[in-house]
Amino acid sequence: MILFRIKRRIMAILLELEVMFLHGVGNIPSHHLRRFFYRACGIKIGCGSTIHTEAKFYNPSNIRIGEDTIIGEGVVLDGREKLSIGNHVAIASEVMIYNAEHDVQSEDFHAVMEPVVIEDYVFIGPRAIILPGVTVKKGAIIAAGAVVTKDVEPFDIVAGVPAKPIGKRNFSNPQYQLGRAAWFR
């Protein structure tokens, strides 16, 4: 029993050191160097994808980012449970995607963890928050500052707190490319 607790404490400390290291990596002014270190720490990053400066990660080994995806400055990506971000996704600055929270109705305030899925061709506006267990389906748009507590249907445009549908995109077969990474952002 005591050995198990010691091992668990050591693993927690090692994970915290890795998170601290990644927070420092987020300030390196080179996209290529940041991506190298992120991959070395277990984040799966597809071809042509970029993560801009000051990104924060929690348990990076559970994070998967598809191809041609751009992650903006100051984004928080929570990997305490599976986090899957698709291809051709644009995530603006200071977005927070969480897959762990506390059960506020529980007497012991225990943690609840659920995976988050962001499908292909999604745009998430600045300072939006995605909460645990949410799937944002293909082509959806999340407005700036929205708090997403429930799944978002394909090509829906959602806004508000909590986020609710306010419109629909006018097409259903996107094929655009997001473009090249800004090397020093």
Image: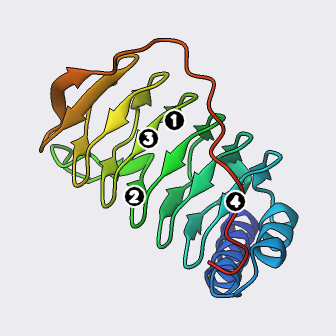
Q: Is residue 123 left or right of residue 84?
A: left
Q: Of the residues under marks 4 and 3, which one precedes in the sequence?
A: 4
Q: Residues within 10 Å of mark 2 (few under 14, many from 20)?
A: many
Q: Of the residues under marks 2 and 4, which one precedes in the sequence?
A: 4
Q: Which residue is mark 1?
A: 115
Q: Are marks 2 and 1 in contact (CB under 8 Å)?
A: no
Report x, y in % for residue 145. 22, 55
Q: Which residue is mark 4?
A: 50
For residue 170, above or below residue 128: above
The local secondary structure at tag 3 comes to strand
Q: Is residue 132 left or right of residue 82?
A: left
Q: Which residue is mark 3?
A: 123
Q: How is the image coloured?
A: rainbow
Residue 113 appears in the picture as rendered: no
Cα separation between marks 3 and 1: 19 Å
Residue type of the residue flagged with mark 1? Pro
